[in-house]
Amino acid sequence: MTHFLDIHKTAPEDLRAMLVQALAMKAARAGRPKGMADDDTPLAGRMVALIFEKPSTRTRISFDVGVRQMGGATMVLSGSDMQLGHGETIADTARVLSRYVDLIMLRTFEEATLLEMAEHASVPVINGLTNRTHPCQIMADVMTYEEHRGPIAGKKVVWAGDGNNVCASFLHAAGRFGFDFTFTGPEVLDPEAEFVDLARKEGARVEIERDAARAVDGADLVVTDTWVSMHDAQSTRERRHNLLRPYRIDDALMARAKPDALFMHCLPAHREEEATGSVMDGPHSVIFDEAENRLHAQKAILRYCLGV
Ligand code: CP
Ligand code: NVA
């Protein structure tokens, strides 16, 4: 069974092959209407369940469109509408779904839910975000960086703000794709030590720098994300904002990066909070290319999981 649960659980050569395939598929359908199928439809006859226990725009729509472009069918399900949200076990849900569908994409809260689904499903499971990681996003981000600037290996990637789920998958990717990673944010919002240690063990240079301006010095890529994630209690909002305000990406901070540095944000963004509108819409920003590449990268992830 080939699941896609996290970047560090997937072999580097498989990750690279997925990005190569994603780029090729993107090029092959350039200019084609979005609803028109690809020439090659490797998912013909396949049914994919897209399950969301949290809101989503990009993940939901890009997976749905991607499966259809490859000739497959989808059903988009909300966790709360399923018995899963009303006491049926994850294991039983996994076993039942495996009788109906060929692949399950799950966005959920606890990582344990995803892992239990994968353990008991007899079809591949893809991680569409948990409280801890967001691997599909970072596959699209690496693809986007390389489309614009060539190989990401050896580049300086700076993450500013909350050491959250998206940051965690960036750390996984640092190990697998061989880039340097600097985290800048308040100590209480540091990424989990386990993720930092793993990236270092895999050979990535990981630095923690509390001063945002020093951190961004010479960066090739500057990344941030919302200050309050979907799993964070709203009661922590004010405290988080106070802690994170020094890490807002504005034009002055971006000017510390290399002149050809890119700016990324997985979206949804809160303009003027974690990043100013001038940066988000400015010359360094590739945020909408990232969003588009979710579609292409995930099509390659789906093919990898289904072996087609
Ligand atoms: N970046 C991302 O995963 O967006 P959605 O929450 O809209 O899916
Ligand atoms: N860190 C954000 C990412 C959303 C795509 C969250 O988990 O809400």
Image: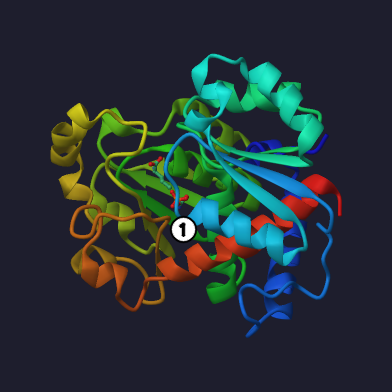
Task: Decide: is 284 above or below 232.
Answer: below
The picture places residue 247, in percent across and down from the top left corner, at 23, 49
- Residue closer to the observer: 66 or 26: 66
Vertical comparison of 101 with 62: above or below:
above
Which quadrant of the structure image shows residue 285?
bottom left
Across and down, in percent, residue 140 comes to 57, 59
Q: Which residue, given by chain and number where applicable, does mark 1 sit on?
A: 156
Residue 179: tell me if it is visible: no
Q: Which image quadrant is residue 267 in?
A: bottom left
Q: How is the image coloured?
A: rainbow
Q: Mark 1, residues whose alpha carbon is within 10 Å: few (<14), some, or many (≥20)?
A: many
Which of 167/70 is in front?
70
- Is disc 1 placed on a helix, strand or loop? strand
Q: Quadrant of the C terminus?
A: bottom right
Q: In this image, 121 relative to 26: left or right?
A: right
Q: Amino acid at mark 1?
A: Lys
The residue located at (61%, 34%) in the rendering is 201
Res. 236 visible in picture: yes
Q: Residue at x 33, y 66 (%)?
A: 257
Quadrant in which the N terminus is drawn: top right
Residue 216: x and y in percent read: 32, 58
Q: Nearer the viewer, residue 280 or 156?
A: 280
User: Which residue is outermost to the bottom?
Assistant: 31
- The total of numbered circles placed on residues is 1
At 51% across and 26% down in the image, what residue appears?
A: 194
From the top left corner, tell me how far across and down residue 224 is, in percent.
35, 53
